[in-house]
Image (cartoon, helix red, strand yellow):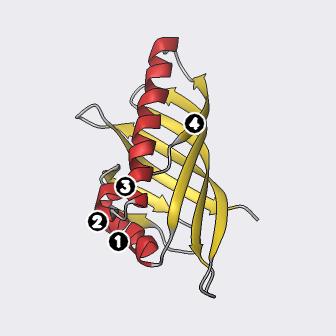
Amino acid sequence: MKHHHIAYVVLSAGLMAPAALADTASEIAARSATFEAAFNSGDAAGVAAHYTEDAVILAPDTDRIDGREAIAGLWQAFIDAGVVDLDLVTTEIEAMGETANEIGAYTLKAPDGNGGMVEAAGKYIVIWRRGADDQWYLDWDIWNSNP
């Protein structure tokens, strides 16, 4: 199992106490780690459970994807296509009360079409929203590949 890497900078946008900022960053890092673990174990429903019910994904080369059910379908398609070894690295978090912005980078492996695997890398931005259960959920998610 891969371990979630985090090299984050906590930024304040408001009057949040430093301890609260650190707690938010730590909570989001933990949620990112379980997101990554769900994907790497082939659990698309587990990945989708990390999103709000009305979340939005703006993935490369596809239409906008709305809602947890459609999001589960997207992640299942990646899993079915043989994408593996997702590794997320948070580089910045900006906490603003019940929402937080995250910038990060990812790597993964995907079939190359010739029986082998190719490593791909990119970057992402996630807007997180704290749920009624006090958990953080991905609300808006966008990523693209590095050239």
**As displayed, is residue 132 above or below residue 57?**
above
The residue where tag 3 is placed is 38
- Residue at the (50%, 70%) spot, across then down: 83
Q: Nearer the viewer, mark 3 or mark 2?
A: 3
Using the numbered discs, state the Cα–Cα distance from disc 1 to disc 2 in whole angstroms.
7 Å
Cβ atoms under marks 1 and 2 closer than 8 Å: yes
Cβ atoms under marks 3 and 2 closer than 8 Å: no
The residue where tag 4 is placed is 6
User: What amino acid is found at the position of numbered circle 2 in the picture?
Assistant: Glu
Q: Is residue 19 left or right of residue 6?
A: left
**N-terminal of the two: label 1 or label 4?**
4
Using the numbered discs, state the Cα–Cα distance from disc 3 to disc 2 in whole angstroms.
16 Å
**N-terminal of the two: label 3 or label 4?**
4
Question: What's the mark number on residue 73?
Answer: 1
Mark 1: few/some/many CA within 10 Å (<14, 14-19, 20+):
some
Q: Nearer the viewer, mark 3 or mark 1?
A: 3
Q: Secondary structure at mark 4?
A: strand
Q: Is residue 146 left or right of residue 16?
A: right
Q: Residue 104 at x, y = what percent?
A: 61, 45
Q: Is residue 33 left or right of residue 68?
A: right
